[in-house]
Image: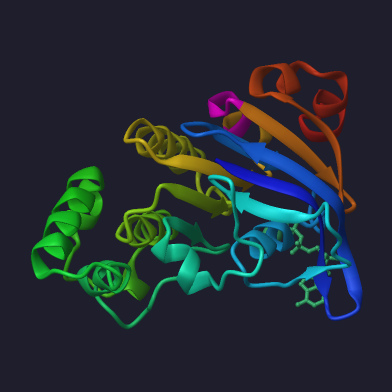
Amino acid sequence: MLEVRRINVGYKDVQVLWDISLEVKEGEIVTVIGPNGAGKSTLLKGIVGLLPLMNRDKESGIFFKGKDISDFSPERLIRIGITIVPEGSRVFPEMTVLDNLRMGAYIHKSKEEKKRKLEEILELFPKLAERRNQKARTMSGGERQMLAIGRALMSNPEFLLMDEPSLGLHPIMVSHIFKTIEAISKRGVTVLLVEQNVHFSLEISNRGYVLENGHIVMEGEGKKLLESEHVKKAYLAL
Ligand SMILES: Nc1ncnc2c1ncn2[C@@H]1O[C@H](COP(=O)(O)OP(=O)(O)OP(=O)(O)O)[C@@H](O)[C@H]1O
Ligand SMILES: [Mg+2]
């Protein structure tokens, strides 16, 4: 469904990612793991059009269902079904839960469509339904992350990218977040995650990639990666 082919990404003249290739098939959950500063967020920003590709050649590009999307803007990507939940559960703090969710639905044309989507999301996140009129800034970190995910789902994505959804959350909330990601996947959304919570993320992933210093150094099935010596040593301190 998504194919990233030999891309280079960075900031102005500083290159961060080198010759990155990866693939996410329809229905999969795929995780990219890597330490702080490895380039995980840079990778997602490159995919969703927030950063331009560098040093391009004929072989490099980003393809969605076979179509070259390398130069699509973030808005255009949302329209074709690709949405990101950015790092740090960013929501509009002074807006209520409902208004935050409605902001995510701007691409739907009809009022009925928006309403239906909102009901579906509130069903998926009972906590958000309970707190629908509360201002986002007064929600807990975990609730805000749910809200950020819910808002992304309001655009009805086929493909969801998530930047460290478990960051800074209590272990119980972390396990809840990963269950939610599995539930989203079961509803037919294909997922590309970047995470430092190696255990939980690889456990629910079909496949994974290890990103270190801007290079992909390993790839494989989620559970196989978890059992690999390198991942055990470098990420699980086993
Ligand atoms: N706006 C920017 N301008 C210049 N360099 C940047 C910018 N944002 C990030 N970088 C650099 O790019 C590299 C990769 O950063 P990135 O945020 O992608 O890492 P990450 O893997 O997401 O890390 P973390 O797990 O801490 O979120 C780092 O060396 C960082 O300093
Ligand atoms: Mg990051």
Q: What span is colored magenta in the figure?
A: 201-206
Which residue corresponds to the image point at 72% horizontal and 22% vertical from the top-left? 226
Residue 74 lies in the magenta-colored region: no
In the rendered image, residue 121, in percent from the top left (x then y), is placed at: 23, 51
Judge whether 106 appears above or below 236 on screen.
below
Which residue corresponds to the image point at 47% horizontal and 37% vertical from the top-left? 178
Which residue corresponds to the image point at 64% horizontal and 69% vertical from the top-left? 71
Q: Quadrant location of residue 50?
A: bottom right
Q: Residue furthest left?
A: 112
Where's the C terminus, which quadrant?
Answer: top right
Judge whether 44 appears above or below 237 on screen.
below
Which of 46/222 is in front?
46
Which of 229/182 is in front?
182
Q: Quadrant location of residue 155?
A: bottom left
Judge whether 163 appears above or below 137 on screen.
above
Left or right side of 138 for 41: right
Q: Is residue 40 visible?
A: no
Judge whether 232 appears above or below 26 on screen.
above
Left or right side of 100 for 226: right
Which residue corresponds to the image point at 44% horizontal and 60% vertical from the top-left? 141
In the rendered image, residue 82, in percent from the top left (x then y), is placed at: 47, 56
Left or right side of 48 for 79: left
